[in-house]
Image: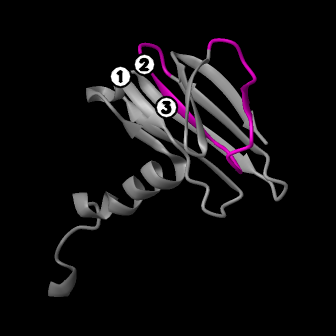
Amino acid sequence: MDPGFARPPCEARAAGPTQVLTESLLGATPVAPGCATWQVKPRPAGVTWVQGQTPTANGPLTVRWAQDTAGQFHLQVTAPPGTGGEVWVPLATTASTSSALTSGATFQRRSGRYDVYTVGAGTFSFSSA
């Protein structure tokens, strides 16, 4: 074996890119141990769509989002039982508006170019334009 490759690729540092993509692009980050409380804050950065999940002690937290060239943004979050958190819906401009397309999401505040909602377990859809 080449001594330059003596470490196995499954070493913890090999997971770094996955964590960066999950937290930055997908926007899913744990807030409490076991991900019982989490935050979803997508950072679109010119990407048209993203889909992924992050493990929690109660099952996967799944996030899907897409945006089009007209500035419309669609976001779906599926949270496992026993969890809850904040969903930050990106806004194209400070004059943009967002809406929760499913019941159970509570609008909390506007923070810069995001509208912030709280949700519990279940599937929740949002849009902004």
Q: Residue at x 70, y 28 (%)?
A: 125
Amino acid under disc 1: Ala
Asked whether disc 1 touches disc 3, contact meaning CB atoms under 8 Å apart, the reply is: no
Specify whether residue 126 is in view.
yes
Of all residues shown, which one is farthest toward the front? Answer: 95
Residue to which mark 1 is pinned? 36
Q: Quadrant of residue 105 in the image?
A: top right
Asked whether disc 3 touches disc 2, contact meaning CB atoms under 8 Å apart, the reply is: yes
Q: Quadrant of residue 5 in the image?
A: bottom left
Residue 11 image position (x, y, % from top left): 23, 61
Residue to which mark 3 is pinned? 61
Q: Residue at x 70, y 31 (%)?
A: 126
In front: 123, or 1? 123
Amino acid under disc 2: Thr
Residue 93 image position (x, y, % from top left): 70, 50
Q: Quadrant of the C terminus?
A: top right
Q: Residue at x 66, y 33 (%)?
A: 76
Residue 47 image position (x, y, % from top left): 66, 61
Spatial distance from mark 3 to mark 2, Cα to Cα?
9 Å
SS of the residue at dot 2? Answer: loop
Residue to which mark 2 is pinned? 83
